[in-house]
Image: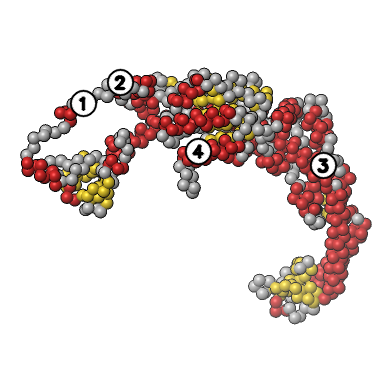
Amino acid sequence: MNNVTFEKIQLNEVKELVKTHCLSSLGKDRIDQLNPSGNINVVKRRLDENKEARKIIENSNHIPLEGLFNVNMIIDKIEKGMILDPYELVKMQDFLRGSRKIKSFMLEKEFYAPTLSAYALNITECENIESEIEYCIKGNKVDSQASKELKKIRRNIGVTEDKIKERLNKFLTASGNKKYIQEFIVSKRDDRYVIPIKAPYKNEVEGTLLDTSSKGNTVFIEPKNVSKFSLELIHLKSEESIEEYKILSYLTELIFEKIKNIKLNIEIIAEYDMVFAKAKYSQNIKGITPKINDQGYIKIVDGKHPLLKGEVIPLNLEIGKNYRSLLITGPNAGGKTVALKTVGILSLMVQCGLDICAKEDTIINVFENIFVDIGDNQSIENALSTFSSHIKNIAEIINRSKFNTLVLLDEIGSGTEPNEGAALAIAILEEFYLKGCITIASTHYGELKRYATLHPEFENAGMMFDQETLQPLYKLTIGKSENSNALFISKKMGIRDKVLKKAKGYMDDKNYHFDLVKRSKITSSKKMDEEKKEKEIEIPIYQKGDKVKLLDQDDFGIVYKPVDQFNNVEALYKGEFIKVNVKRIELYLKATELYPNDYDLDSLFVSFEERKLDRDIERGSKKALKKIQKEMKESRKR
């Protein structure tokens, strides 16, 4: 399977919903790495784990996964030969304690969660490391009780600091020093004890000047009588750092000796966090664990797309038993694409080991591959049209498809000449069938509906449409195709019945009836004044749709009405109709060169609003349909 399938079917968005139920980044990372499996045994194990996790949640007050931080960065640091600081050691201690708790918790659930509880047997308990860290580290600092030497050093540090403070206090209280002192406090600079002295008296006080205030009014001097003890304190602090380093090294070494076991603990904890998140998600959506098979059979009973909100009309679909290819027809915006995506996302979710929102009778096939061609893949960078990019994608899918592959195709063969598109679509569907694929495709082509009716391994299905309200019902009916309802909507839009009747006839039997009009009604009289003939010979003949150059504007326009009796042509220029004398225009391109013979030239001059309304109706816009309904109601009232 590929990322294009995951993106089009929105699998990653579903995974984001599941991640909200994780208690640590370990579980979230595992869900990010989770991909659908094409192995039915793996999928069965995943679903069984999900069932067990739900039972545990239903029968427990809480799962002891809180506080289990991701310690992978700490492990990386140890493997690089670095020494852990007290904070990192405390985090590792918390993780090891949490691992021990989850192991005890899961082993107690062996009766109704045999698979998940078995994983706990591989968790290594490191109580000796926990106790050593707890003994040596207090308040994220190395405790004095961690070693006899550290205790001795810190005791000496305390004694030395007391001596320094005693002498400094004597200095502060000596009457002869009062005039020198800026503030009667003991301060610290560079971890050495100093007295704030007024700057003018800095040479009057014996000692070492260590700092000056920002304004220069105060200097900080270490009096001479404490210098000896300050040097001793510096030496003791150095010894303290060395001893702390030894203790931290010792604790880090203890962890390093068990690093393989701890890494396995991390993997198991991550798996537990992911499995319980999947179970919580299942509870949240009121999901079910469907039956699975690898025989190509899908039966979705009241299935719902997990990302749809509000009142969702469920999908009922079956394929793979009596037929292996399904063609879905129906109106634009009628739910065909949603139906395809629902089949795809439910299949991918199950293969990820996720429960789905459906009824218990649902059966999902485990596919080795799922490929989709959904949406507009037009590529400006590669200069590919929508049709070309779709065909390029389908060509890649054909090359990679084989037996036990699900193929979902939206509007197959569209975007090109209808006859060619329908023929190509049929050939593509045949190829997928011959490869043993399960194929579901949506289409508007009548030829494909007819083909599905005749082929024993193909079946039609339709998205239902309410002809009274012009609203799609979003319900799929198997064994019955649905029209795009273009004729019905055209009738509602005011196209005359006789025109629609002809269109229906052409759809049914392809027989065209040529009702010819007498030429005398559409040709002008042959009797013309000789002078008019000569003028007409001199005047170029412009036809509707001709592209002409407007000499005054030095720009181009399109002829709307040919030359009138005053030798003026009406042309469309920048959205407006203007009259221009034939002497002020030049022919650039004839309409016959610009457009096909059967091209509707009137469409060139239809207003933007009318074109927009036509497009909205064509794509099944609810807003446009409501507008039509409103106009119909108002016309009935009149």
At 43% from the left and 36% from the top, the residue drawn is 416
Q: How far apart are labels 2 and 1 at the CA level? A: 20 Å
Decide if residue 364 is in sight here. Answer: no
Amino acid type at circle 1 is Val
Disc on the earlier residue, 3 or 4? 3
In three-dimensional space, the C-alpha distance between marks 4 and 2, rounded to whole angstroms, equals: 37 Å
Q: Earlier in the sequence, mark 1 or mark 4?
A: 4
In the rendered image, is residue 209 in sight? yes
Picture coordinates of residue 266, whole percent (x, y): 77, 42
Would you name the residue on which mark 1 appears?
A: 517
CA separation, marks 3 and 4? 55 Å
C-alpha distance separating marks 1 and 3: 95 Å
Please tell me the numbered disc located at residue 497: 2
Q: Which residue is mark 3?
A: 97
For image coordinates 44% across by 25% down, the residue present is 446
Q: List the residue tagged with mark 4.
A: 390
Q: Nearer the viewer, residue 592 or 191?
A: 592
